[in-house]
Amino acid sequence: MAAVLSNPIARRLLRIPPSYFVFIVLLATLWIARPNMLNLNIMGIFVRQIVPLGILVLGQLVVMRVKSIDLSGGGIILLINYFISSGSFPGASLPFFVVLALATGLAIGLFNGFMIGNRRVSAVIVTLAVSIILVGLVQFLSSGNPPGDVPKLFNDLYNTKFLSVPTPVLFWILLTAAVSFLLSQTVFGRYVASVGENAEAAHFSGVPVQRTVILAHTLAGLIAAIAALVQTGSIAVGSVRVGLDLPILAVAATILGGVVFGRGDGGVWGPFFGALCFALLFVVMTVLGIDEPGKLIAQGVIILGAAIFYGVRVRNP
Amino acid sequence: MHRSLFNILSGRNTRQGLWGLPLVVALLISVWLTVETTQFATAENLFNLIAQAMPLIIVAIGQLVVVLIGGLDLSVGSVISFTTAVLSLDQPAIVLIPAVFVLAAVIGLVNGLAITRFNVHPIIATLSTQYIVLGFTRILRPVSGGTVPDIVITAVSGSFLGIPFPAFWGVIVILAAWKLLYGSRYGLHLFAIGGGIASGTESAARNFGVSDRRNIILAYVVCSCFAAVAGVFLAGRIVSGDPNVGLLFELDTVTAVALGGTQLSGGVGSLHGTVIGALVMALLANGMNLANVSPFVQTAIKGGILLAVVGLQSRKKMGL
């Protein structure tokens, strides 16, 4: 095995994020199983469903680049969905909800960042705890029942198309490009890369490690809020279960996209394709008649497989 | 005497961590509940309390083993649900009971191998097995149902000389864990490996001839097997298989372990602290039930406690 791994061609291949291979395999599977499904309209609908996940992945990849993780996205999505659908703010307009959502995400992200960067608490524990606190609160406030309806404007916006491409998909691509710019062209992006490579070396080179980690988490919270707005637009009703499995899928898509704790080989587009893989995966599984338990197993196997793929590579540089 | 009491309460200069304080907290909650409610100090409620606390105590001890080596096992909740699902498969007990432990050991082995051989972060490895095992559980038992073998039900619901069986489970599990952690070479190695990992010199134990890889794999196997014991116990309590019974156990056990003064970075911790931590959690749950606190709020409060106890621990590493 070691001999294969030290082969230059194999090593070059291993640099490519697994998401590209998986994407091609899934596309081929779908092409063999259901060739008639591969048209722009149907694919547009499937990809549109995955947009909240795709946006959440953007936040996840930023925190994973600084060797952290954010599992609080589910709680943030649920809370914002509750704000919008519960009718607690009668007569509020769309801009009000957007500002409210962004402020909520910002505050929770900042709290995560403070606990992780300043208090040095394990990121998994902080963000999982924050998530269960938020979920518990929302379920208590709504007594376990779905709150109510979402203002119609959300769903109308979600259903619009621009040049026959669904607007949410376009929005996702633009946001991905923005994060790509942020990570590759700005000082913050450099800080993120250096903290992820070696936090100690970054510290001694004058990089504000703590501030970078806090900022990364704040950004992730903000991005989760955006994902929450899109998710709310997509389901168009209040729910006490919406988005709870998204953070773990986001971790899976990010690892699949070649971004593993501190290493950013996959850039931003690797995880982008990672999210697309899940869009295709769900289609393929539905086509093949695999239901909920099979999807859980597939998620787990994908995370473990991609992590092993990287683990093997790190050990044989 | 005075000096050692201070050391215990402050957790200073010990390998056991801060466990005196949670004991005080547990006593305070008990006193408060006795005074505030009439139902608390009844034999029936105390029996309930032991039975309620037992699964958490058992799994928390398993979690302690992996936390001592600086790891974390997020798959314990799924292993518990999986165990109850397997036990409800309508086969003879002689087949099922060994089967659940073999399966649990396999899950632990997968975790351990992924972490040591393939360099996967413990949290990621156990997070993925959590989902894989949950998936298999849902295949076996999409909703709760079935019946578990009679022997399992008798083993948790009977009593001997007026002492309910769950108390015996506790004594046996705690004694076994005591022997494992404090009376065996393996226990010593666990502390050695964990201490090295916590101080950032991962090769420390290896340099003294302690095989860290094999011991780490074994720690995850032990943890899974403890979760399976708790699964058998719970299956007996609920008399059927339930795919959701283990939900949130991974966080509750981490809370219990951290509450008992164990450092999540590894190397520092104690069995008695963990048992006390689990008891505090059970007392809180019992008190909140008696006070009619909504289960949703209880979840949120547990999350808050987790944040608080872990937030108070200091560690060098940032991030995961």
Image: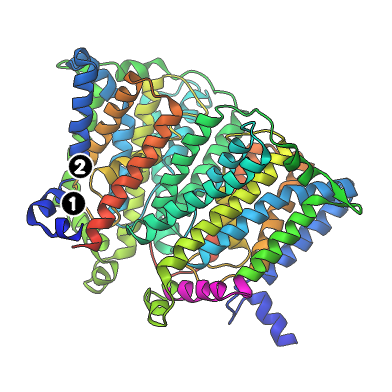
Residue lying at 21% horizontally and 14% vertically, measured from the top left:
A41
The location of residue B113, given as percent across then percent down, is: 39, 57
Q: Chain of mark 2?
A: A
Residue B173 in the figure: left or right of residue A41: right
Q: Residue furthest top?
A: A36
The location of residue A37, given as percent across then percent down, is: 22, 15
> Mark 1: few, some, or many residues within 10 Å (few <14, many ≥20)?
some
Q: Which residue is mark 1?
A: A265
The location of residue B58, given as percent across then percent down, is: 65, 55
* Residue B305 visible, this orientation: no
Give the position of the N terminus of chain B as an image quadrant.
bottom right
Judge whether B50 appears above or below A146 on screen: below
Figure quadrant of residue B199: bottom left
Highlighted range, magenta:
B181-196
Residue A299 in the figure: left or right of residue A162: right
Give the position of the C terminus of chain B as an image quadrant.
bottom left
**Do circles 2 and 1 both sit on a common chain?**
yes
> What secondary structure characterizes most of the magenta part?
helix
Judge whether A35 appears above or below B244 on screen: above
